[in-house]
Image: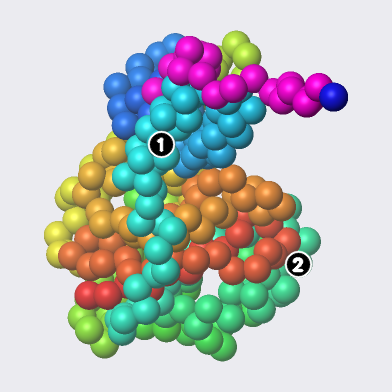
Amino acid sequence: MTKPQNSRAPWSGRRGRVLGVLSALIALLLALHSLVPGSPGHVGSLLETFLPWLGLSVPVLLVLAVLRRSYVALAATPLPAVAWLALFGGALLPGDDSPHTLTVLQHNVSDENPDPAGTVRTLLGADAGLVALEELTPAALPAYEAALSADYPHHATRGTVGLWSKYPLSGLRQVDIRPKSFGDGWDRGLRATARTPRGEVAVYVAHLPSVRLGLSGGFGAGPRDESAVLLGAALSAEPLDRVILLGDLNSTLDDRGLEPVTSQLNQPDSDFAFSWPARLPLARIDQAMARSATVTRIWTLPATGSDHLPVAAHIRF
């Protein structure tokens, strides 16, 4: 009786070269993303906004290499894995739970939020010393003020952004981050000095312009980038040593468009804390950063009536 032969092809070093090249290209994109050109259509910024998701290619490439039974493809699979871990491996580690000086909270509450009171109940769970809110409409602002007043006796608003504080505030002023093409009345930046038990800190609240993705204009990040330059200039001119920035910056910290801001401030080095969109978070575009201080941990709170998740952070002076 003839013994049945194995119908599967043996492993080979000749097959799978295309998969091997694809692994190498993905590794290069991760390692050299800053060299991807910005034009046309701000393609570099688009790549960097969703850069962590390139890590999903690793298990896919591994499965394809096994199905193809290719030594070449299997050997190349670690390349994007190593590049990804070099960039984002720290985000897989638990946040620093050592003593911190201050808890802060950032939330774009959405101008269509149907439940301001319920939103505030969620925010109070973080027990933050500073709370920054964006997309505050004139109609909804009194509801937020009433719900937050007992826990936060000090607050300031400018345009559609606001800051609530457990500590006295002074030096309140608007921060002009309006792109030239935007009309008067577009006010999305403020600055205040918070007198904390550990000394004064300049607190900035900012909401940069939204980006648009379209077939004709590509990744429409021009106004956002222009606003980031203005915010960066304000931070550079800030006389106080300690600075905290809270805001919806409409991109991730890997995006080169935010470099005028990110180059001046310390960023959290753990936890992805994806905040947008709330139903299926793909990126953290709500940020908490600091100067002359360390953001030791960052995390998201449960969903509210907004399309963003609230983001809380621990800061150590």
Q: Which residues are magenta?
A: 2-24
- The picture places residue 245, in percent across and down from the top left corner, at 35, 58
19 falls in the magenta region: yes
Judge from the rendering whether residue 86 lies leftward or rightward of residue 304; answer left or right.
Answer: left
Circle 2 crowding by C-alpha within 10 Å: few under 14, some 14–19, many from 20: some
Position of the N terminus, as image quadrant, is top right
Position of residue 11 relative to residue 169, above or below, is above
User: Residue 33, located in which quarter of the rendered image?
Assistant: top left
Q: Residue at x 31, y 81 (%)?
A: 98
Which residue position holds label 1? Answer: 78
Model colouring: rainbow
Q: Amino acid at mark 1?
A: Pro
Q: Residue at x 59, y 74 (%)?
A: 123
User: Residue 24, located in which quarter of the rendered image?
Assistant: top left
The mark total stands at 2
Judge from the rendering whether residue 173 lies leftward or rightward of residue 185; answer left or right.
Answer: left
Which residue position holds label 2? Answer: 115
Pick whichever, 70 or 78, lies toward us. 70
303 falls in the magenta region: no
Kindly report which numbered mark, 1 or 2, lies closer to the viewer in this rendering.
Answer: 1
Circle 1 crowding by C-alpha within 10 Å: few under 14, some 14–19, many from 20: some
Q: Amino acid at mark 2?
A: Asp
User: Residue 150, located in which quarter of the rendered image?
Assistant: bottom right
- The picture places residue 281, in percent across and down from the top left corner, at 62, 50
